[in-house]
Image (cartoon, grey):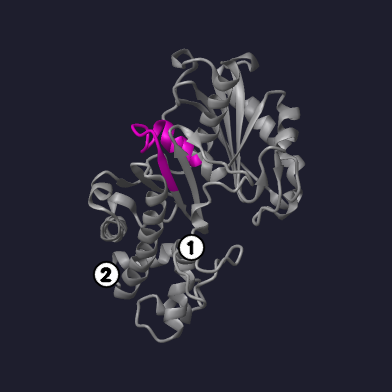
């Protein structure tokens, strides 16, 4: 899979260079990025989770070397590596703790193992925080001093930047926006991942949207999606979006409901941080600005926010879709490595 960023030749790059690594449960995205955020080279490899983390680190280093070789960069051109990973972690110790989608990686010293293998300093960060830093650096938020990013996928990730500083937190749990409470009823929905009750992820993730739709269909709601259940096919956020594109009223209702709870979550975060911009990233954007469904989705979020905030806050806050897409992770990891490199040099 190729990245969506233009590839800049080494001769046009601004030194020094930084490597960004974005680890996922299925794939690992790796990019070589210059001091201005331009991509010089990119490669995606399979995570191969059951084979364990050591082999993934070794193959990541091999990919990093191939990328440098392909664009003519030498090891001395690379100042630092940024590593973004999902799940719970201990950032000061460089440890993966118990990532839900990487069970073979539990209690694994991923930062130090990569650092020893690549022989370069490694900056360690949560994957959604890395994506937020990418959007802050060269994406939707590049003109703003602060930013909140929500990544809408299987779960809901998040990243918060305040005056250029990424909020990592004392327990390495900072910026976990998907776990803010949006429903405090005792029978509020549970997160598919982790089981948190009433949290944003339980209402606005792709897994939650699919679960909510399936529940409605099994209780007799009328929809074109019913035939999928009848034929034993899974209800997914993508299939809900496809039905909504065809005017399916139930599918649109499900998307509106997710947007409602996102509006509540956005309001909570804006009232806490007042960032000036909230960016929606991840795969579940229902077509984004290119689709009437995507535009309806984000307009509903803006409406809910506007109804619950103050006029000056409403007028001074932008809510937009992310612009870097799946590239935000490796770009942000490289950008965070750049930030730590410059801090260490000052």
Q: Position of residue 198 (x, y in %)?
A: 50, 68
Tag nearer the camera, 2 or 1: 1
Is any atom of residue 327 visible in this view?
Answer: no
The picture quadrant where one finds residue 306 is bottom left
Location of the C terminus (image quadrant)? top right
Q: Position of residue 240 (x, y in %)?
A: 39, 67
The local secondary structure at tag 1 comes to loop
**Residue drawn at point x = 61 percent, y = 28 percent:** 81
**Residue drawn at point x = 45 percent, y = 32 percent:** 164
Vertical side of 189 occupied by 66: above or below: above
* Span of residues in magenta: 131-149
Q: Residues within 10 Å of mark 1 (few under 14, many from 20)?
A: some
Q: Residue furthest bottom?
A: 220
CB atoms of marks 2 and 1 within 8 Å: no
Q: Residues within 10 Å of mark 2 (few under 14, many from 20)?
A: few
Which labelled disc corresponds to residue 181? 1
Q: Earlier in the sequence, mark 2 or mark 1?
A: 1
Nearest the viewer among 180 and 259 is 180
Q: How many discs appear?
A: 2
Residue 186 among magenta residues:
no
Vertical side of 35 occupied by 278: above or below: below
The answer to whether 242 appears left or right of 88 in the picture is: left
Vertical side of 255 occupied by 77: above or below: above
Q: Position of residue 294 (x, y in %)?
A: 31, 56
Q: Circle 2 sits on which residue?
A: 247
Give the alpha-carbon distance from disc 2 to disc 1, as whole Å: 31 Å
Nearest the viewer among 25 and 259 is 259
Q: Position of residue 235 (x, y in %)?
A: 47, 71
Nearest the viewer among 201 and 296 is 201
């Amino acid at each position: 899979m190729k990245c969506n960023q233009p590839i800049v030749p080494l001769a046009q790059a601004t030194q020094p260079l930084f490597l960004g690594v974005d680890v996922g449960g299925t794939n690992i995205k790796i990019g070589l990025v210059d001091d201005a955020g331009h991509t010089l080279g990119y490669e995606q490899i399979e995570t191969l989770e059951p084979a364990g983390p050591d082999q993934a680190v070794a193959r990541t280093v091999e990919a990093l070397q191939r990328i440098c070789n392909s664009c003519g960069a030498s090891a001395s051109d690379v100042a630092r590596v940024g590593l973004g990973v999902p799940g719970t972690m201990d950032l000061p110790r460089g440890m993966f703790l118990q990532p839900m989608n990487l069970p073979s990686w539990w209690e694994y010293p991923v930062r130090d193992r990569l650092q020893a293998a690549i022989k370069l300093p490694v900056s360690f960060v949560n994957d959604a925080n890395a994506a937020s830093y990418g959007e802050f650096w060269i994406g939707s938020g590049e003109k703003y001093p602060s930013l909140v990013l929500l990544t809408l996928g299987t779960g809901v990730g998040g990243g918060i930047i305040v005056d250029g500083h990424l909020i990592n937190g004392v327990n390495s749990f900072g910026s976990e926006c998907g776990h803010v409470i949006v429903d405090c009823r005792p029978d509020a929905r549970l997160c598919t991942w982790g089981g948190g009750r009433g949290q944003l992820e339980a209402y606005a993730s792709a897994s939650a949207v699919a679960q909510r739709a399936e529940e409605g269909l099994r209780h007799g709601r009328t929809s074109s999606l019913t035939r999928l259940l009848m034929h034993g096919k899974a209800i997914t956020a993508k299939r809900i979006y496809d039905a909504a594109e065809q005017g399916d009223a139930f599918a649109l209702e499900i998307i509106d409901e997710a947007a409602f709870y996102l509006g509540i979550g956005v309001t909570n975060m804006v009232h806490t941080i007042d960032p000036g911009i909230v960016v929606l990233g991840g795969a579940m954007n229902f077509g984004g600005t290119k689709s009437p469904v995507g535009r309806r989705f984000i307009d509903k979020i803006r409406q809910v926010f506007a109804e619950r905030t103050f006029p000056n806050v409403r007028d001074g806050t932008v809510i937009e879709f992310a612009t870097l897409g799946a590239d935000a992770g490796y770009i942000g990891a490289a950008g965070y490595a750049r930030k730590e490199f410059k801090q260490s040099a000052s």
